[in-house]
Image: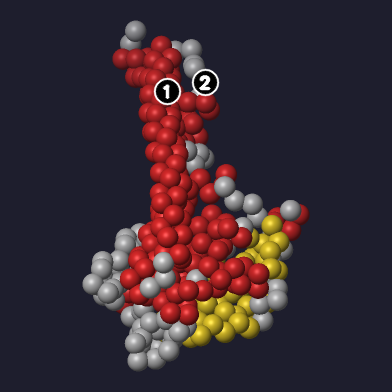
Amino acid sequence: MGIGAWLLISFLEYIRKKKYFLDITEKMEQLDKKYYIVAMLEKGKRQEEILNYQILWEMEKSMAEHVNSYQSANQEYKEYIELWIHEVKIPIATGKMVVENHRNKVTEDIEEELNKIEGYTEQALFYARSNYVEKDYFIHKIQLLDVIHTVLIQNKKVLIKKKVKPELHDLETEVYSDSKWLIFILNQIISNSIKYEREEERLVLKFCAKQEKENTKLFISDNGKGISAAELTRVFEKGFTGIKERNVNGKKATGIGLYLCKKLCNKLGHGIVIESKENLGTTVCIIFPKGSILEVI
């Protein structure tokens, strides 16, 4: 074979291999999950193509086994947390019954701490479920006013103790959501408002709904300590605690509440934004879209 023929064969082989790997690259770029590439490839007839296919197949199989193992362990842990929380709620309820039957200043303080424990266990439960919310929620038409009333009743004792003044406006409207998850979100927002009230002024909590063309907005406003402009963009970050949050009544905050609110709103298809000015108060807006596929439910 002459050198010219050898060069031609080598060039054609280079072109073939280049086309082969470009084809793989293009197919991968079309995939959100790159490990599905094996399903889009042909085994091929040449030895190197067969070998390359087998290597990718073994890698994909190993990865799938690893992911399945992780998912199984994660599900097992979630189930354990849910069971643990269910068991913890029993002594909490028992403790509240004891307090109810022996009312005095000491037992009222104990009840307040039990309520905090109950709130933290509820937060842990929703945190454990937050990655599986699609299997745990039911989107349907609900009355905003009914949800707000439920939340206020759940927080009645602390609202009375803190002398919080609730104001409700224009809430006779329906939205699509899951009432259980929405109540949890609102409880987190109210808890924050109470936690960061200003001592020199009575805390006012305002709930107001506004109908717009493409959505319904629910505003929850307070006249508390507010959030600085430097920290406002980070309030939904997991574990973020601003200057005020780092030491509330001598206890370190977790930075989980608003993170969960954002995560759950995203899962439910709701928007959530916060506006705030330091020492002037905070407004949280939850946005419920209209005209979506949810209307067929």
Residue 217 is left or right of residue 63, and the answer is: right
Which residue does the numbered mark 2 point to in the structure image? 42
Q: Is residue 245 above or below residue 75?
A: below
Please state the horizontal and vertical placement of residue 144, each as a whole percent of the image.
65, 70
Residue at x 45% of width, y 50% of height: 90
Residue 51 is left or right of residue 132, and the answer is: left
Residue at x 63% of width, y 83% of height: 169
Secondary structure under tag 1 reads: helix
Answer few, some or many: residues within 10 Å of disc 1's Cα (few below 14, many 20 plus, some between 14 and 19).
some
Q: Look at the image and tell me whether residue 12 can be seen.
A: no
Please state the horizontal and vertical placement of residue 185, each as a whole percent of the image.
50, 64
Q: Look at the image and tell me whether residue 268 can be seen.
A: yes
Secondary structure under tag 2 reads: loop
Q: Is residue 180 above or below residue 191?
A: above
Task: Measure the alpha-carbon separation of dots 1 and 2.
Answer: 17 Å
Which residue does the numbered mark 1 point to in the structure image? 61
Q: Is residue 215 above or below residue 179?
A: below
Corner quadrant of residue 244 = bottom left
Q: Amino acid at mark 2?
A: Glu
Residue 51 is left or right of residue 181, and the answer is: left
Front tag of 1 and 2: 1
Q: Amino acid at mark 1?
A: Lys
Residue closest to the eye, 200 or 256: 200
Residue at x 43% of width, y 45% of height: 87
